[in-house]
Image: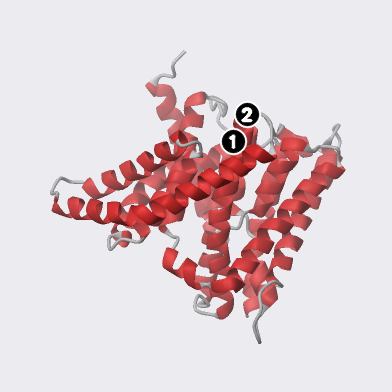
Amino acid sequence: MEPSIEFVLAHLIVILLSAKLFGELAERLGQPPVLGELLGGVALGLGVVRFFQPNAPILHVLSELGVILLMFQTGLHSDLDELLKVGSTSFAVAATGVVLPFLAGWGAMAALGRGGLQAVFVGAAMTATSVGITARVLADLGKLQSREARIVLGAAVIDDVIGVILLAVVSGAAATGAFSGALALKTTLLSAGFLAAALWLGPHLTARLVKLVDRMRVRGVLVASAVVFAFALALLAHALGTALIVGAFTAGILLAGTERRVDVEAAISPVADLFVPVFFVMVGAQVDLTAYNPFQSGGPALIALTAALILLAIVTKLAAGWAARGPGLKRLAVGVGMVPRGEVGLIFAGIGLAAGILDKPLYAAIVGMVVATTFVAPPLLKKTLA
């Protein structure tokens, strides 16, 4: 049965209210608002609002729309010119910060006898780095121009690109229900090829698009054009055999290279502010906190697994900092800057749960790892850069 408009409106009211109220609380406590949105979803999942249905298909669609807009925003915040200038140091940090966490997550699951796709998803979720959270802390400290900050932000942007490709790989594996080297190689080549082709041809297209928009007088043409561009590239990427998010991310990078970048960011923010929180709230709503009950079957094992993932997630990113080279460089600060998983780690978890690859307890363990690393990074970064 199709959901009624009343159903959709009622659910959007409680989702947006919980996102903003808990986000405000997190902000006042000196934490990223995304954590508040996540906790708001956890509260809804516990039954605070009796009519809330976290498994409703329409909410899943709205959540997916939020992911696409989130990846579009991520692309808008990625400066391709700066990415090309950061050099070998940032690339070394980024590569180490992807390989070590993936191997650690995959190895931990394999050691527990839970290999295959579950191990791949856990490893993939461990690779993420939230450039937004790290950049916010660095800005608050007035350290954005420091060598450590440039290396961390460059590495985090490279991590975003690698992460998008990895997301495409695991999404393809989730769709088929199996992971194979051939499929991973095909998806990687398709995603990388799509990014390369779009970045080569795209600037000519976006330059003409911007000129066309500048000549138009109708209200809202800039935001409508930006959203259409993002959705069109997302659909094109999907049609060519890679993930929707690859196209959305690429659209953001292309528009970031135009003279209207700031205007596009300002125009798209209100749209993203409506739909992106839906994704984070729905991620939180799927967390089963009762699975952490130490007095029920499986509770102690889940607590131990979550603690192990948190420890591995922190240690492997700290190790990535030691890949940085340079006299007087605070490598510990570089490593700490790579620790927060943030939104990208949650996207991995959400895809795995939606595909039925991750069960509720394992999903809760991954979300717990993401939340913990996002919590500990800001105070540690402040301390190491002081």
- The location of residue 11, given as percent across then percent down, is 47, 30
- Examine the image and state in which quarter residue 257 appears: bottom left
At x 70%, y 40%, the residue is 364
- Distance of mark 1 from mark 2, alpha carbons? 6 Å
The residue labelled by disc 1 is 172
Is residue 3 shown left or right of residue 331? left
Q: Are marks 1 and 2 in contact (CB under 8 Å)?
A: yes
- Examine the image and state in which quarter residue 313 appears: bottom right
- The location of residue 221, given as percent across then percent down, is 22, 46
- The location of residue 374, given as percent across then percent down, is 63, 57
The residue labelled by disc 2 is 176
- The location of residue 24, given as percent across then percent down, is 50, 53
Give the colour scheme shown: secondary structure
Q: Amino acid at mark 1?
A: Gly
Please give the label number shown on residue 378.
none
Check the picture and name the quadrant holding the C terminus: bottom right
Give the structural element (helix, strand or loop) at label 1.
Answer: helix
At x 43%, y 45%, the residue is 248
